Image: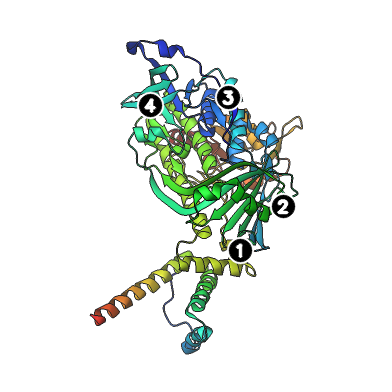
Amino acid sequence: MVQARTQFGYLRHPDQDRAAADTAEYPVVIVGAGPVGLSLAIDLAQRGQPVVLLDDADRIGEGSRAICFSKRSLEFWDRLGVGERMVEKGVVWSVGRIFHGDSQLYQFNLLPEDGHKRPAFINLQQFYAEAYLVDRVRELPAIDLRWRNKVVGLESRNDGVALTIETPEGAYRIHAAFVIACDGARSSLRGMVGAEFSGQVFEDQFLIADVKMTAAFPTERWFWFDPPFHAGRSALLHKQPDDVWRIDLQLHPDADPVHEKKPENVRPRIARMLGHDKFEFEWISLYKFQCRRMDKFIHGRVIFAGDAAHRVSPFGARGANSGLEDAENLSWKLERVLRGISPESLLESYHVERSAAADENIRESTRSTDFMAPASRQEARLRHAALALAKETEFGKRMVNGGRLSTPSIYETPLSTPDGDIWRGGPRPGASMPDAPIAARDGRSLFLTDAFSGGGTGFTLLEFGNGAAVDVPDGIKTIRIGGDDGFADAAGLVGKRYDAEPGSAYLLRPDGYVAARFRHPSRPLLEAALARASGFN
Amino acid sequence: MTLSTSSNFAKPDDAFRAIVEAHRGLTEAQSADLDAALVLVLANHIGDIDVLREAIALAKRRMLEANQQQQQQQQ
């Protein structure tokens, strides 16, 4: 059932004909052209950084992998020039429902307020996301994408890495100042640097089926505990583009994988769930969860991102989204280090910030999995009590855990300048920037995230006008709200979401996270905050 | 807030009795189900994670020590 959606050709590269003494040297080599590697390559290229991107395959595979992409990921993809295409193709959703037996326990809305450019989530098959990213890569001459180039050897040096690469026409070598390993859950580079990948494997098995059918179910995430069509276990139903529905059924730990995977055995289960059997299978697979992460994401000049660095269970959409957050976090730091404007130690903040995010994602997804598959009789009892109490109490509903969906982490990081003023709200240093609608001087409507991504790739000062403009250090772009020449806060939501008063200002990192905020910004305050966020302590 | 271990009920015997009576006539499994639900209800009423953690630590420590003493007496 695994078919190629898109096939790419292997091309011989001139590097393969170079003599050993004349090995090609590159600043950045990314290994793995999945969503994380592709996004990272695009972001680096847009910052003017040439990138070599290697992938051991020559196609984008079908199959059921990531489907839920978060608001944060879409905002990142907007900056990469692919967000619109993803949203147009994707299925937009924000509402989830949790059922117990045949009755609804509660529903939640992940984006209950207006005034955001992007929805809480879209569902989109991973192969579409990858295809759109590859299309964007092809527009960027700074990216040298090489298919069927498999890294088989890695030698770490103080100032770089030597890679041995196997191709259909034999092996060759290249040198890189930095290698970014985005080569997925079974990362071979992880083994090559001798890193541990420790964590927990869950014994319960889950059956994933993507089925094609026309159905009138709403575009919501539906999760059942102990449904009438699948007694004693849990089930998930979620819509994807092209009339494809993701169905996830929890199986008994002792279920026989070969037997369970056969379409003739899967079909009756799903027919019971849907109440009919007018559907076709796109994909069936069986899996167990693992929650693991590397102790260190940085091994000398080899840096790990995405599933290569951390794995979570799928309930919560924390896999691909956290990988994309890794990419947006790493890109600007790497670019500054390569250009020599930040010390190499800035990269350590990538490990600090993203390993803490991985811990949070693992904690959340482990809790969800434990709730769905209790490990002992007493755990099952507590879960049963929570489900029973959820029928009539608010707190019971909130304890029932059918997956807590991915939201960006708030970083506790040395790059943040602690608040020195009084704030009653707004994103604190280390948090990502909330979106809000604004209007340009000519009346054109746009969003704060548009203004942010439209202004280049560096640090940005979001300033709430109060007379003369703030004296800003060189190289910082300004987005002014209000005042004589700024954007209008058309709906009053920017001021509200940023707890702003006239004169307030937020210093935003190139990845859209808050580095510092001030009620009364001054050049010395901004210079100190900028230095800190750039890795100078 | 910290866990209160002073006596909070005007009539502690009434409280103990109320819990005991709730278990009367139940099987072991039913009793365990009742306790599980009761723990969640009371934990939410407390609504303070630090107090809850202290309560768990106290209950667990006492339980473990009591079990040890019992074992020593049997030896």
Q: Which residue carries the number 2 mark?
A: A276
- Give the residue type at disc 1: Lys
- Neighbours of disc 3 within 10 Å: few (<14), some (14-19), many (20+): few
Label 3 sits on a secondary structure element that is: strand
Do labels 2 and 3 touch, CB within 8 Å? no
Q: Is residue A346 visible?
A: no
The disc at residue A152 is 4
Label 1 sits on a secondary structure element that is: helix
Do labels 1 and 2 touch, CB within 8 Å? no
Q: Residue at x 46, y 68 (%)?
A: A378
Mark 2 chain: A
Q: Residue at x 54, y 33 (%)?
A: A35
Quarter of the image that includes the N terminus of chain A: top right
Mark 1 chain: A
Query: Distance between the Cα atoms at labels 1 and 3?
Result: 47 Å
Query: Distance between the Cα atoms at labels 4 and 2?
Result: 49 Å
Q: Residue at x 39, y 69 (%)?
A: B57
- Give the residue type at disc 4: Val
Expressed as whole percent of the image width and height from the top left, the position of residue A465 reads: 64, 37
Earlier in the chain: of badge 1 and badge 4, it is 4
- Are discs 1 and 3 located on one and the same chain? yes
Q: Which residue carries the number 3 mark?
A: A7
Viewer-closest of A502 and A290: A290
Do labels 4 and 2 touch, CB within 8 Å? no
The disc at residue A397 is 1
Q: Residue at x 33, y 13 (%)?
A: A20
Earlier in the chain: of badge 4 and badge 2, it is 4
Mark 4 chain: A
- Neighbours of disc 4 within 10 Å: few (<14), some (14-19), many (20+): few
Label 4 sits on a secondary structure element that is: strand
- Give the residue type at disc 2: His
